[in-house]
Image: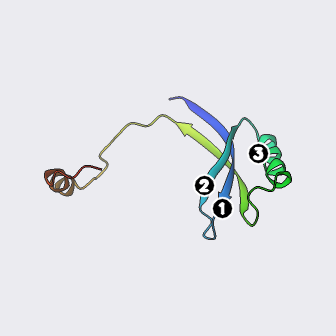
Amino acid sequence: MSETRQFWLAKVDRHGNPTLTDGAHSDRAGVERALYLFGRLGLGKGNTYRCAEVILTDVEPKANGANEEAIRALNETGLKP
């Protein structure tokens, strides 16, 4: 399994939920530089930012207890996203 580590400047909402904003950076210093530049350029005023360390790994689809009956019923409606 492959693994990639990234660092992102993340805007955090009032509930603590992050939105990845600027990146990906190879280290925390890149995030700190991005936050500095945001401030100097007048971007993101009033927002709260954090450093998010993201680990990307391969993933395979697995049912793991999915409700197949509900999935079948939804698929039969013909509705597509």
Q: Are marks 1 and 2 in contact (CB under 8 Å)?
A: yes
CA distance separating discs 1 and 2: 6 Å
* Vertical side of 21 occupied by 1: above or below: above
User: What amino acid type should be assigned to the residue bearing mark 1?
Assistant: Val
Q: Which mark is residue 19?
A: 2
Q: Secondary structure at mark 3?
A: helix
Q: Quadrant of residue 69?
A: bottom left
Q: Which residue is mark 3?
A: 31
Crowdedness near tag 1: few (<14), some (14–19) or many (≥20) residues, C-alpha within 10 Å: some
Residue in the image at 56% along x and 38% along y = 56
- 58 on left or right of 31: left
In x, y percent, where is residue 57? 52, 36
Q: Are marks 3 and 2 in contact (CB under 8 Å)?
A: no
Crowdedness near tag 2: few (<14), some (14–19) or many (≥20) residues, C-alpha within 10 Å: some
- 42 on left or right of 50: right
- 30 on left or right of 53: right
Q: Which residue is mark 1?
A: 12
User: What amino acid type should be assigned to the residue bearing mark 3?
Assistant: Val
CA distance separating discs 1 and 3: 14 Å
In x, y percent, where is residue 26? 72, 35
Q: Quadrant of residue 27?
A: top right
Residue farthest toward the front in the current orientation of the protein: 42
* Vertical side of 20 occupied by 57: above or below: above
Which badge, 1 or 3, is on the more N-terminal residue? 1
Which badge, 3 or 2, is on the more N-terminal residue? 2
Camera-side residue of 32 and 69:
32
Residue in the image at 28% along x and 53% along y = 65
* Vertical side of 37 occupied by 27: above or below: above
In x, y percent, where is residue 5? 64, 37
Q: Secondary structure at mark 2?
A: strand
